[in-house]
Image: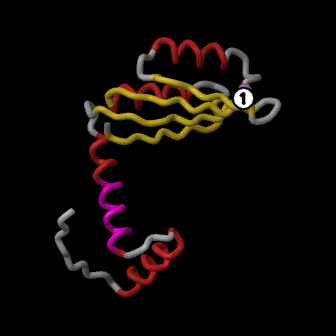
Amino acid sequence: MAVERVGVAFEPELLREFDGLIRAKGYASRSEALRDLARRAIIESETAQKDAPVIGALTILYDHEVRGITSRLLELQHRHAEVLSTMHLHVSERACLEVLVVRGRSNGVRALADRIRALRGVKHGELVLTRV
Ligand code: NI
């Protein structure tokens, strides 16, 4: 792949911190780290557009002993075609971890994730999206 070289000016303090981060994360070079940051910023910006086609995963941790939580979760998943697949792990006596693979338009997927996170009993939820 052809590459174009660019010069980037850093303040010394920022460069020192960035080099520390690059080492800690195990990047082979500053260039690879900068390319990675650029790709991430582009994906974030694209998946933020409400009509963008996206795919990703919503990971939630919830307490299955909260009354009605299991059926409300199932109902939402059945009603929303964005949910392609789920994986469920029984983490402890009360805690369940569920990973929902989702695909659709950015706004639809985000709205569904918001509704699931808002359910009583859902303790934590993170949505990770990328472009299709
Ligand atoms: Ni469980």
Please identify the quadrant where the C terminus is shown. Answer: top left
Q: Residues within 10 Å of mark 1 (few under 14, many from 20)?
A: some
Measured as percent of width and height from the top left, residue 6 is found at 19, 75
Residue 45 shown left or right of residue 76 in the figure = left
Split into quadrants, the picture shows ligand 1 in the one at top right
Q: Residue furthest bottom?
A: 12
Q: Name which residue lies at 47% across and 12% down.
A: 79
Q: Looking at numbered disc 1 in the image, what kind of residue is underneath it?
A: Asp
| Observer-nearest of 79 and 35 | 35
**In front of the other: 94 or 117:** 94
Image location (x, y in percent) of residue 131: 32, 40
Residue 37, above or below 97 = below
Question: Extreme right residue here?
Answer: 93
**Which color scheme did the rendering employ for the protein?**
secondary structure
Quadrant location of residue 80? top left
- State whether the magenta stretch is mostly helix, strand or loop: helix
The residue labelled by disc 1 is 63
**Residue found at x 61% / y 38%:** 124
Which stretch appears magenta? Answer: 31-41
Label 1 secondary element: strand
Relative to 92, is 2 above or below?
Answer: below
Q: Nearer the viewer, residue 78 or 121?
A: 78
| Residue 36 lies within the magenta run | yes
Q: Quadrant of residue 50?
A: top left
- Residue 86 lies left or right of residue 44; in this view the side is right
